[in-house]
Image (tube, rainbow, N blue to C red):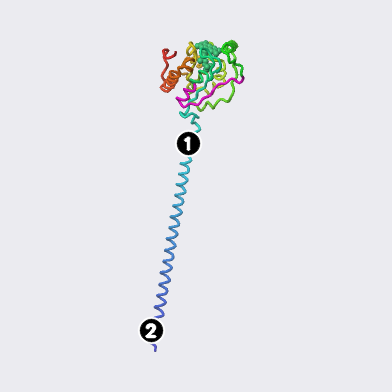
Amino acid sequence: MKRRNDLKKKVRILSLFLTALMVISLSACGSKDSSVEDSAQQNNTVESDQSTKEDTAEASTTGEASQTEDQTTESEPGSESGDILVVYFSRTGEQYTVGVIDKGNTAIVAEMIAEETGADLFEVLPDDDHYPMTYNELTDVAKQEQNDNARPAYAGEVPDLSRYSTIFIGAPVWWGDWPMIMYTFFENNADVISGKTLIPFSTHEGSGLSGFDKKLSSACPDATVSDGLAIRGNDCQNDQESCSMRSRESYLYSVHSASYTEQKVV
Ligand SMILES: Cc1cc2nc3c(=O)[nH]c(=O)nc-3n(C[C@H](O)[C@H](O)[C@H](O)COP(=O)(O)O)c2cc1C
């Protein structure tokens, strides 16, 4: 009887021991699992931190890129080519040797240069209609303005000149000089024009460039004035192929910083 009791006692102790062992091992497993979870969670946190950092880095890179793009856009000129503007003055109506014209001679050259270079265009227009449409009357008004050293006003808003590094500036020769309205333009914009490359061009009926380059240099002393282009007004209307070639030449010369020789000026 005592033996049976001892055996029962031993079995209970053994089962208690086994139970305790199971509890211990289960709790150890549980803690192991949770630490795995913790570490996985930590990893996730690191990953998400990392990806946040990467996202941020990417975002800031993208930001930088878009900022760079923005800056490029800001500094990017309106023109396809980047930074060229063509400013011109021109008259329609009755004109010397060509009769009544719908598009001014200088306007034709200006548009050709713009097309060749992808430049923007700005036309200097008088802010009233005091320039007659008949040739003789126009020459009288122009002579008077020259004698008075007048500064006729122009209309419209000048584009932001700071966006351009190169500006072609053209006009018809009037009494051997720039039309006075162009001096208004030069003087009003001399500050912004300083440091830029200016390429003068004229249309004329025999006087060539008429010192447009030197006069432009005097009016805008802080700009670099390239040698200019002179084209016969009659060619603009009646020989557009040569006119176009000359316009292209003007661009190529300006790009290669080459100078026009006297022979190139008609
Ligand atoms: C008021 C006036 C003065 C001119 N003076 C000259 C001149 O001194 N020398 C010259 O070669 N052509 C002279 N011309 C001719 C113009 O320069 C020429 O016809 C020019 O191509 C006109 O350009 P536009 O159509 O763009 O106005 C004069 C024309 C006008 C209307």
Q: Position of residue 52 (x, y in %)?
A: 47, 49
In this view of the protein, can residue 125 be seen by the observer?
A: yes
Q: Amino acid at mark 2?
A: Leu
Give yes or no for residue 117 being in the magenta stretch: yes
The residue where tag 2 is placed is: 7
Q: Residues within 10 Å of mark 1 (few under 14, many from 20)?
A: some
- The secondary structure type at the circle numbered 1 is helix
Give yes or no for residue 49 being in the magenta stretch: no
Q: Position of residue 231 (x, y in %)?
A: 47, 16
In this picture, is 124 found above or below 174?
below
The residue where tag 1 is placed is: 69
Of callouts 2 and 1, the N-terminal one: 2
Of the two numbered discs 2 and 1 in the rendering, the one whose residue sits closer to the viewer: 1
Q: Which mark is residue 201?
A: none
The reply to whether the C-beta atoms of the residues labelled 2 and 1 are less than 8 Å apart is no
Q: Amino acid at mark 1?
A: Glu
Q: Which quarter shows the N terminus?
A: bottom left
Task: Report the span colored magenta.
Answer: 110-128
Q: Position of residue 82 (x, y in %)?
A: 47, 29
The residue at the point 47 percent across, 36 percent down is 69
Q: CA distance from mark 2 to mark 1?
A: 89 Å
Could you say which is closer to the camera, residue 184 or residue 121?
121
Q: Position of residue 188 (x, y in %)?
A: 57, 21
Could you say which is closer to the camera, residue 60 or residue 175?
175
Could you say which is closer to the camera, residue 221 or residue 82?
82
In this picture, is 107 found above or below 61?
above
Determine if the C-beta at disc 2 is less than 8 A from ligand 1.
no
Could you say which is closer to the camera, residue 214 or residue 208?
208
Q: Quadrant of residue 154?
A: top right
